[in-house]
Amino acid sequence: AKARVIVIGGGIGGATVAKYLAASVTTIDVTLVEPRRVYTTCFFSNLHLAGLRPLEQLTHGYEALAKQYGITVVHESAETIDPSAKTVTLNNGSKLSYDRLVVAPGIAFRGGAIEGYDEAAIEIMPHAWNAGPQTRLLRQQLESMEDGGLFVLVAPPNPFRCPPAPYERASLIASYFQRSKPKAKILILDAKDSFNAQDLFQDAWNRHYPGMIEWLPAQFTGGVTAVDTKTRSVITAGETFKAAVANVIPAQMAGRLAHQAGLANQSGWCPVDPVTFESALQPGVHLVGDAIIGGDMPKSAFCANSQAKACAFAIAADLTGSTRFPAHLFNTCYTYLAPDDAFSNAISFQPVDGKLKTVLSFVSKVEESADIRRLAARAAEGWYDAFTHDVFG
Ligand code: FAD
């Protein structure tokens, strides 16, 4: 009989594992469990918020994975995992058996960190940290905001999905305000005292949007403690900020299923072997993407995709008895400061003493020319098409 691999989560990490396993070995049956029929990418969703990309262009289906690669795609959510019986129970009650399991559930939000930020509040002060309806809602709020209004962005504590993304969001929304609501202001209330690529962002904010964006670190405000949706206020220890639009990005942890299945440790994230991406807590279960403790690897789509390939090849080698190759892991990231100004980085990683460590890195500099930045903004568009084709095509 063919070996059975179940992949839970059809986001960037899960879809890539399923595709690369199915494409590289014909003696493995691959099932992908994902409740949603379409996936909207978080990457480039900040361009949607700025009115620069329709959400439809960021939305991908599972047809190619099913038809071209023979993956069984089940649109249900996984409720429980029983690692000793090697079974997964779905929310429709059916039970699936596996030889190997891959779990790629992305992130969940930590409850209780910000008082009043509950399920109902999410519909009034969207996080838009999973793309789709939340992104659409935030865009609608920005569009209907009056000129002169205050947009408050609450930035999360480390570690979180995509370190530069809150600041890219502020930059692109500033570019939208500059075009459509030039009297509007942006206030970033951060849970941290510094942030990723801070020099590049602050340089760009001074050049492109002088006086529009204010960033307040945790040491000045004590961080956001509560929200009041009735008055659309964001509350810190010393001050209350009344927002026209509020985007609250809460503290994060591995997706819920990882906790149910005993895959996460007390940090809230999942420890893995950095070569095979097998769980350090449950043998026979592998994890990739934002849910893992990735060492130097940030929680990015590019990293999830790179980890997924290493994981797929390790599982294929184990199940077929073929040679296992050493993992090569990468991150490439383009970040928009303005529609024609983007910076980039490229980093390679390797497992060293049980941890994923940076080997080589390139990071854009503040003094780069406008031409280089314009080229990066265009290269990012090509990257988007090639990358999503690699995952879903
Ligand atoms: P996801 O892509 O979130 O996939 C998880 C999937 O699991 C989801 O489809 C979910 O429905 C499914 N799932 C969850 N629970 C279950 C369950 N119980 N049963 C079945 N399925 C389940 N990264 C970059 O590389 N470049 C960028 O420019 C970039 N920009 C970003 C901008 C923003 C605003 C944000 C928020 C993120 C950005 N990222 C970027 C980060 C990137 O989106 C994530 O790192 C990436 O999506 C992680 O992939 P994942 O597979 O771990 O999780």
Image (tube, helix red, strand yellow):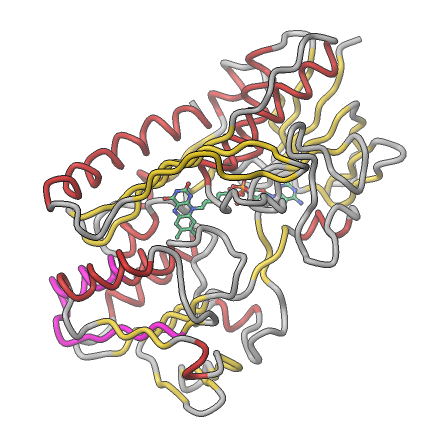
Total numbered labels: 0
Residue drawn where x is 46% and y is 69% of the image: 192
Viewer-side residue, 240 vs 279: 279
Residue drawn where x is 42% and y is 24% of the image: 390
* Identity of the residue furthest to the bottom in this view: 238
Residue 187 covered by magenta stretch: yes
373 relative to 224 in the view: left or right: left
Q: Position of residue 329 (x, y in %)?
A: 51, 30
* Identity of the residue furthest to the right in this view: 85
185 relative to 86 in the view: left or right: left
Q: Position of residue 354 (x, y in %)?
A: 68, 37
Viewer-side residue, 306 vs 250: 306
Instruction: Answer above or below: position of 296 versus 155.
Output: above
> Would you identify the image quadrant in which residue 41 lies?
top left
Q: Position of residue 320 (x, y in %)?
A: 72, 9
In what quadrant of the picture does the C terminus appear? top left
Q: Position of residue 271 (x, y in %)?
A: 70, 44
Viewer-side residue, 370 vs 179: 370
> Would you identify the image quadrant in which residue 54 lies?
top left
In magenta, the rendered stretch is 171-189
Residue drawn where x is 20% and y is 41% of the image: 377
Residue drawn where x is 29% and y is 42% of the image: 344
138 relative to 54 in the view: left or right: right
Viewer-side residue, 294 vs 337: 294
Residue 126 covered by magenta stretch: no
In what quadrant of the picture does the N terminus appear? top right
Instruction: Answer above or below: position of 316 versus 280.
Output: above
